Amino acid sequence: MSDVARLAGVSIKTVSRVVNDEPGVHPATAERVLAAIERLGFRRNLSARNLRRGSSTGTLGVILEDVGNPFYSVLTRAVEEVARTQGRQVLTGSSDEDPGRERELALEFCARRVDGLIVVPAGMQHGYLVPEMQAGMPVVFVDRPAGDVVADTVLVDNIGGTADAVKHLAAQGHQRIAFFGDAPDIFTASERLRGFREGCARSGVRYGEDLVFMGPHTETRVAALLDRVLGGPDPATAVVSGNNRITVHMLRALYHRPARPALVGFDDFELADLLNPPISVVQHDAAMLGRAAAELLFARLEGDSSPPRRVVLPTRLVARGSGEVSP
Amino acid sequence: MSDVARLAGVSIKTVSRVVNDEPGVHPATAERVLAAIERLGFRRNLSARNLRRGSSTGTLGVILEDVGNPFYSVLTRAVEEVARTQGRQVLTGSSDEDPGRERELALEFCARRVDGLIVVPAGMQHGYLVPEMQAGMPVVFVDRPAGDVVADTVLVDNIGGTADAVKHLAAQGHQRIAFFGDAPDIFTASERLRGFREGCARSGVRYGEDLVFMGPHTETRVAALLDRVLGGPDPATAVVSGNNRITVHMLRALYHRPARPALVGFDDFELADLLNPPISVVQHDAAMLGRAAAELLFARLEGDSSPPRRVVLPTRLVARGSGEVSP
DNA sequence: CGCCCCGATGACAACGTTGTCTGGATCCGG
DNA sequence: CCGGATCCAGACAACGTTGTCATCGGGGCG
């Protein structure tokens, strides 16, 4: 900036005035300054500007399990879209479901003075965020609640959605329904299990521990468990899958079986409608999650200081046929 | 920081020494400072630090078409992974294929003094980046080259990959092969068309303008064109699809047809192997693209000043069956 | 002619850090 | 008892900006 000032024969303050479109600069002077800026390729340093002005950094931190996962990348995109209307950029970080990594990222983002944090929590301990929140850092949790912190949270109706899946299957006459979910220490997984139980109770389906499996995360493991559940004297005739990845594992495991069980998966996925049979799913909207979280965050940034809110977005059962295969 | 200093009864310089683990602080003093930091929830301001030290901001800018698109989100994740080993964060921005938006994002990132830029270029004009690059901002272009700037670039072998697809189909006896691609002003689209032509020439397949369609981007449009191509007196028996989205449109359009043409798509996608028939694709690795770009960028950051490089990553034809359907 | 006001510009401090240098104890050997 | 080394700690400037205030010349008005 001082180089520009020297070249234009003015003080740095005048350069500042020009780059900020402040009034009270003689047009001829402004001309000279702009020419100098052009010639030197000057671009003002936003960090220094924000430091001096004490204004926001114009950035948002988003921490999730994996940006590469379509579910979260759609969520990220939605956040970005809202941020854009507010002239803000988005910093992303993948925690890989590791609480330590999440903490590291969050504190790093705080040290960078992001304007706010959107977090898909890994683990259950988030007390480390309390000082930051007290210091005025707005934090919104998405997809899962924080373990030990009261803060704005946006969730989907895991319980209702899974219960709907059971209801749908029961309506088709299924009485032996299995559930495959993620590790039970993951919030969404345990909620969906709860929804499964409630659904069974409400639909008059006998709930059996022997038909519930939490945490199988490899294709072979899923295949082996499926074999067990579908064989035997009293086999399951339908399966509810607790998430996307498990659904896909199941599809691969079932691919070569002649008779498939009915199947409803939690989470929609591309091409589900083009499979044979098309896969019925409990749909929830990642973009809407992201949008809701970002809007909550921006409301806080604009001074909303009402008590923390918990938003639960609805799910929608999309019957495509896989739930209707006769036993 | 001065609050901490006051509370601990020391100067701010001593606080600085403590937070930076500098030697030469009395353990008892350090203790007091740490206690004060804890009590006040102090966190040092990284922007100010970087400003003062003149060191890097520890951030990378990534500009792509859409973070929500799985292809780019996997790429982003790979970049993030490499950045992480270097202790850097990633700022992302979606250009939506709009050159103006891309420019805006890029200049904003430069003003934030990111350490480097990874760009999936939209449009053909990137002259605006020249001053930044001369000022020392390393830029790597990914997936497509920049129109008018010489810089590091990481591409995939679009021509070879598409030619392979044609060769594969020709080997199955197909002689009338159609090509559906993206708008021809998109680099990858025109390259793949070129590959299609070359493949036809090399494999002895007659290339026909009437079988080539660039730019249909809605399902109905794709369906209508497919109808035209597959009907008539001399119908196509096979189709090459120029990208993911078009492949999916085609699959939907073909879903209810009794006899499908053979099909090879550019870009792999999840579940392609579970469709009926499984879809053959030309596979390329988004993660590898991201990794290669990030590594190139970091090499520049470490002082590599060799001439700009152009890396072309290979593609791999994965035959799954859809290319082998008899005409 | 003197006054005030206004438009244009610059000097200076400050944002929150850290690098450099200096000051004051304390301790050792001679 | 003194010189110098060693250990701690603080004063100050600087990073690149911008807000505040002061300066200066000129024009309008009484």
Image (tube, coloured by chain):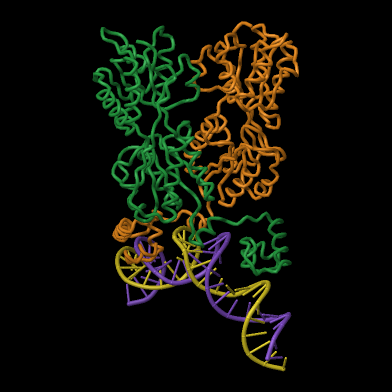
Chain colours: A orange, B green, C purple, D yellow
Picture coordinates of residue B63 (x, y %)?
Answer: 42, 41
Picture layout, residue A121 above or below residue B201: below
Q: Farthest residue toward the front?
A: B171
Look at 35% across and 21% down and name the residue there. B168
Give the position of the C terminus of chain A as an image quadrant: top right
Give the position of the N terminus of chain A as an image quadrant: bottom left
Picture layout, residue A172 above or below residue B17: above
Where, by quadrant of the figure, is residue A308 drawn?
top right
Residue B288 in view: yes
Q: What is the total number of numbered labels drawn onto the structure image?
A: 0
Picture layout, residue A234 above or below residue B78: above
Picture layout, residue B113 above or below residue A239: below
Look at 32% across and 11% down and name the residue there. B230
Residue A56 in view: no
Picture coordinates of residue B22 (x, y %)?
Answer: 62, 65
Where, by quadrant of the figure, is residue B180 drawn?
top left
Look at 30% across and 21% down and name the residue there. B213
Picture coordinates of residue A229 (x, y %)?
Answer: 68, 15
In the picture provided, is D26 more to the left or to the right than A159?
Answer: left
Look at 67% across and 27% down and name the residue there. A215
In the picture provided, is A274 more to the left or to the right than A129?
Answer: left
